[in-house]
């Protein structure tokens, strides 16, 4: 789950709490597993860091490959 940059921390915390609760529900787990989803339940700070690292990594791959991005 993602939220727009600048979303207040209390909103992120509330969404995280609701998502964590939903992911603990066996019916939700079963429904998402049937769709091929893997539930992780990461903390917002760790996920934010992961996304930043992935963005840097793939930006370098795109640049090194000479892919035109339209920017």
Image (cartoon, rainbow, N blue to C red):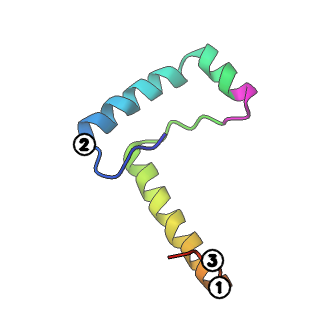
C-alpha separation, residue under disc 3 versus residue under disc 2: 32 Å
Q: Position of residue 25 (x, y in %)?
A: 55, 16
* Residue under label 3: 61
Q: Nearer the viewer, residue 27 or 43?
A: 27
Residue 32: which disc? none
C-alpha separation, residue under disc 3 versus residue under disc 1: 9 Å
What element does badge 1 sit on?
Answer: loop
Seen in the picture, residue 51 relative to 15 is either above or below; the reply is: below
Are the two marked residues, 3 and 2, in contact with CB atoms closer than 8 angstroms?
no
Residue 8: which disc? 2
Q: Which corner quadrant of the image does residue 12 belong to? A: top left
Are the two marked residues, 3 and 1, in contact with CB atoms closer than 8 angstroms?
no
Seen in the picture, residue 45 relative to 49 is either above or below; the reply is: above
Q: Nearer the viewer, residue 41 or 62?
A: 62
Comes first in the chain, label 3 or label 1: 3
In this view, the mark in front (1 or 2): 1
Q: How many labels sit on residues?
A: 3
Q: Position of residue 47 (x, y in %)?
A: 46, 50
* Magenta stretch prevailing secondary structure: loop
* Residue under label 1: 66
What element does badge 3 sit on?
Answer: helix
Q: Is residue 41 magenta?
A: no
Q: Residue furthest front?
A: 70
Write the start and end of the magenta stretch as one range. 33-37
Seen in the picture, residue 61 relative to 37 is either above or below; the reply is: below
What element does badge 2 sit on?
Answer: loop
């Amino acid at each position: 789950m993602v939220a727009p940059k600048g979303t207040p921390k209390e909103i992120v915390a509330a969404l995280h709490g609701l998502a964590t609760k939903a992911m603990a529900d066996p019916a939700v787990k079963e429904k998402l597993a049937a769709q091929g989803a893997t539930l992780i339940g990461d903390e917002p700070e760790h996920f934010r860091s992961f996304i930043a690292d992935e963005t840097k990594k793939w930006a370098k791959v795109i640049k090194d490959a000479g892919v035109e991005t339209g920017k």
